[in-house]
Image: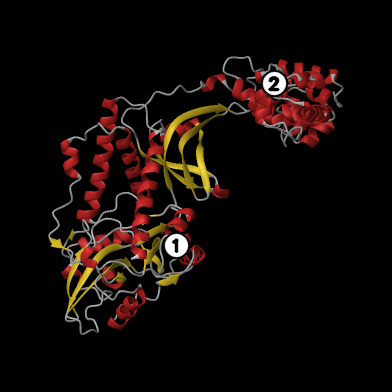
Amino acid sequence: MVWMIKLALAWLLVSVCSDVSFAKGRFDCPSWSAERAKTELNLLTRALNDWDDAYRLRGESQVEDEIYDGLAAQQALWRGCFPSIAINESVADLAAEPPYSVVHPAAHTGLVKLADESAVQAWMSLRQGLWVQPKVDGVAVTLVYQNGRLVSAISRGSGERGENWTTRAQALPGIPQRLNTDLPQVIVQGELFWRLDEHVQQRDGGQNARAKVAGAMMSKALSPQSVERVAFWAWEWPDGPETMSERLSGLKEMGFSFGITQTHEVASLNDVTRWRGLWFEQPMPFASDGVVIRQGRRPPGENWSARPPIWAAAWKYPPPQQTAEVTSVAFSVGRTGRISAVAHLRPVTLGDKRVRRVSLGGLSRWRKLDVRPGDTVALTLAGQGIPRISRVVWRVAEREAIVVPDESHYHALSCWRPDEEGCLTQYLSRLVWLSGKEGLNLSGLSEKTWRSLIEGGQVPNLASWLALSRESIAGLRGYGPRSAEKLYGQIKAAKGRDAAQWLRGLGMTFVPISHIRQAGWERLAARDEKAWRRDAGLSESGARRALAFTQHPELHAAVERLKAEGVQGF
């Protein structure tokens, strides 16, 4: 009785947590009119139903599981944001289950999905007698045996009813056809999966294994490869003995192999985490997408219903990709005048990272992707764990107009001052490069520091900040005695850098710093195109760019300031 009370409390906890999460989501609702919300909801609902139809009726997986789940969650969020919006009847009709013909003798329940370790810990703390097993990535099925012989195979379908797969199941040697038992009837639930050789989930991913099984079971005739590869994983004996150990022992004696030896008793979160990591990283004969934690004692199968129970839950592996909704698109101009796009996202977790913004690269890639606010994108982790948008998986119908910077306005010699129209981001990029490792190599002069100095009117050009005194810095907003002294120390350090470091920081990146130091400013400034080609080995176009840089009036103005500050080499 005590454990039943605990399970009831756990179910309430799951429900409350779901409501809290949804309530939080309401603060992120899009600012759409009712008419637009209806249009967007109808289109997304129709797409989800079309994908469902393709999978259930034809065995075609037209979109990855994690993408489908993300878009289904997006639809649920929108429906919660606009509860008064009614979906068109023609669309809603598509959401109805196909007319499955066979009733399951025990309903398929589905699983609650636990998001992370803390959720798993909370779920486990209210239960006892727990077991863990791989969550095999296949197709759920019910097998019915009478007098030890397979007489029925039923697809999961709606959970209450499914399709008759008996003929195909009886042709698959990977499904036990006869059991070693005296029981008049045995009902087993499990997963039809595609057997793989030395499959490592972390390395190999899902390999479309589930779709292969679904396609095989819905095909007119089984292929030789399907006959060889499709096998059965037993994960429940609905009307079996009361305890998990007795059920596993009984299934093994009857002749089931997969699912028996891979189910283990666990006493703590550490136990579950250990098995989860092992199955994710080590070779297995199947694809899996997480683990299932089960209570050893649960109600008999006759009391099950087609909804997630309180005695079993799934903890999935980190998905190889994640979906995120784009809230805005912003543009920045780099030091050389290159324009980059950045997508701001509704925050999502990818791996161990919380992602709020992702670079889209240059304008050409942004135009190719055509990312707009409201779109849903697929995120992956590129090299060194950097989030990357791989594609747009859903586009909102109403495409928001975006003001894009004029590419013709920006180049390597534009924006030497912050007060020029549209120049703030490129000017800021120049300052960050100047103080960074490739320039003066100063510590503590971050983008945030430069931005505050610009806003305070202290950096009207690239060298004017050298004139700041302790007193003037201390009078700036946000600066106390210690921070003012630290900034003043960096200004003194900048005055101690030589002309070569300053010239490189100001943009002379087309020749090595050793060449700058050897030639000296006066000789560099006196060169013509021919001299740049001869003495620096530059191409014709490179020599023209070098000459344009060394003759630019803003550079000469900065050099005059540096001379006045006593910088060595000018």
Residue 43 coordinates in the image, percent (x, y): 26, 36
Location of residue 33 by image quarter: top left
First in residue order: circle 1 vs circle 2: 1
Nearest to the observer: residue 460 or residue 197? 460
Instruction: Evaluate if marks 1 and 2 touch, with contact meaning CB atoms under 8 Å apart.
Output: no
The answer to whether residue 545 is seen in the rendering is: no
Residue annotated with mark 1: 201
Residue name at image x 51 percent, y 43 percent:
354
Where residue 395 appears, as percent x and y from the top left, is: 34, 35
Quadrant holding the N terminus: bottom left
Q: Residue at x 23, y 81 (%)?
A: 179
Judge depth for marks 1 and 2 and give the one in front.
2
**361 to the left or right of 551:** left
User: Which residue is at the front of the view, 516 or 318?
Assistant: 318
Q: Give the number of marks.
A: 2
Residue positioned 48% across, 56% down in the render: 117
| Mark 2 neighbour density, 10 Å: few (under 14) some (14–19) many (20 or more) | few
Q: What amino acid is found at the position of numbered circle 1 in the picture?
A: Gln
Residue 94 in the image: x percent, y percent? 18, 44
Closer to us: 410 or 113? 113
Distance between mark 1 and mark 2 Cα atoms: 54 Å
Q: Residues within 10 Å of mark 1 (few under 14, many from 20)?
A: many
- 163 is higher (above) or lower (below) than 567: below
Q: Is residue 408 in sight in this rendering?
A: yes
Kindly state the secondary structure of the residue where label 2 is placed.
loop
User: Is residue 193 left or right of 127 when viewed as pictured?
Assistant: left
Element on which disc 1 rests: helix
Which quadrant is home to the C terminus?
top right
Looking at the image, what colour scheme do you see? secondary structure
Residue beneath disc 2:
477
Residue 392 relative to residue 309: left or right: right
Amino acid type, label 2? Arg
